[in-house]
Image: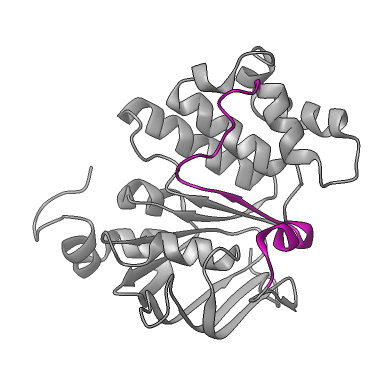
């Protein structure tokens, strides 16, 4: 799974939305090609800020972000997309007034490739979208919106896809469906960073995970090891000593 050179390295990054308020405080993250890496932590730990920072939405005050061998801290999001990164935000991740097909067009306009051929690849991954190509995105269910949001990001064939809490506000049944889709996309070859509040389920599908606390990476390890670590369970997964995991 691991390649010799990481596809993404976040090194000693300090970052925040406004001057003088640092949300990320010297964070270090490494992601290798082909991995599904989960980032968990309590509310306010800096998970979503990390995702936004990597994608150029939060300014880096110090440290480095290296993607595919190139420093990208300081680049704009549209420039980072051209470098081969996709990002699905937690909210406002589709155009509700546009159809499924039009949303995918919006995702692929920067590629310079055959958009129709790329759309067909997305429909092959998400057959439910293919059946409703003309349906407006605003009428889709929560799970279907997440499919479309991922599909739109995949239109650029990203080397790395960042998902920011894709299961937020979804029903338990839809949560599992979305996790299954994330695993499927990863198995097809897309490297994924999954920022997720549903920590247990996220760690269960991850190759590796990071636990953030107060803007720092406190723990790192295999997803299964973090999931079964009593200390992690008690502090971050809501599992008391002697309590089983479901």
Percent coordinates x, y for residue 109 in the rendering: 81, 40
For the C terminus, which image quadrant?
A: top left
Please say which color scheme the image uses. Answer: one colour
Above or below 113: residue 16: below
For the N terminus, which image quadrant?
A: bottom right
- Foreground residue, 83 or 31? 83
- Residue 124 included in the magenta stretch of the image: no
**Residue 81 placement: quadrant:** bottom right
Above or below 129: residue 114: below
Percent coordinates x, y for residue 118 in the rendering: 82, 34
**Point 90% across, 45% down: residue:** 112
Above or below 108: residue 20: below
**Point 42% across, 70% down: residue:** 221
**Residue 154 placement: quadrant:** top right
Which residue occupies the extreme front position in the image? 19
Q: How many marks do you count on the picture?
A: 0
- Foreground residue, 10 or 75? 75
Q: Is residue 204 left or right of residue 194?
A: left
**Point 68% across, 74% down: residue:** 72
**Point 67% across, 50% down: residue:** 190
- Foreground residue, 81 or 241? 81
Percent coordinates x, y for residue 92 in the rendering: 50, 39
Q: Is residue 43 left or right of residue 61?
A: left
- Residue 91 included in the magenta stretch of the image: yes
Give the magenta-colored segment's residue range: 75-99
Q: Is residue 133 left or right of residue 206?
A: right
Percent coordinates x, y for residue 168 in the rendering: 36, 40
């Amino acid at each position: 799974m691991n390649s010799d050179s990481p596809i993404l390295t976040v090194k000693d990054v300090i970052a925040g939305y406004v001057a003088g308020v640092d949300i990320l405080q010297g964070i270090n993250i490494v992601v290798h090609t082909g991995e599904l890496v989960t980032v968990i932590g309590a509310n306010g730990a800096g998970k979503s800020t990390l995702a936004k920072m990597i994608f150029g939405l939060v300014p880096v005050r110090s440290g480095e972000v290296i993607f595919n061998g190139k420093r990208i801290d300081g680049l704009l999001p549209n420039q980072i997309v051209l470098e081969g990164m996709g990002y699905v935000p937690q909210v406002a991740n589709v155009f509700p007034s546009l159809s499924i097909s039009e949303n995918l067009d919006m995702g692929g306009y920067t590629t310079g490739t055959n958009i129709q051929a790329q759309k067909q690849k997305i429909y092959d991954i998400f057959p439910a979208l293919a059946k409703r190509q003309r349906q407006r995105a605003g009428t889709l269910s929560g799970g279907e919106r997440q499919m479309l949001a991922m599909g739109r990001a995949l239109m650029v064939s990203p080397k790395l896809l960042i998902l920011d809490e894709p299961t937020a506000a979804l029903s338990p049944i839809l949560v599992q469906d979305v996790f299954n889709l994330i695993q499927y996309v990863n198995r097809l070859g897309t490297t994924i960073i999954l920022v997720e509040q549903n920590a247990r389920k996220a760690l269960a599908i991850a190759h590796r995970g990071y636990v953030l606390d107060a803007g720092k990476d406190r723990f790192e390890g295999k997803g299964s090891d973090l999931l079964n670590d009593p200390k992690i369970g008690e502090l971050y997964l809501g599992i008391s000593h002697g309590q089983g995991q479901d």
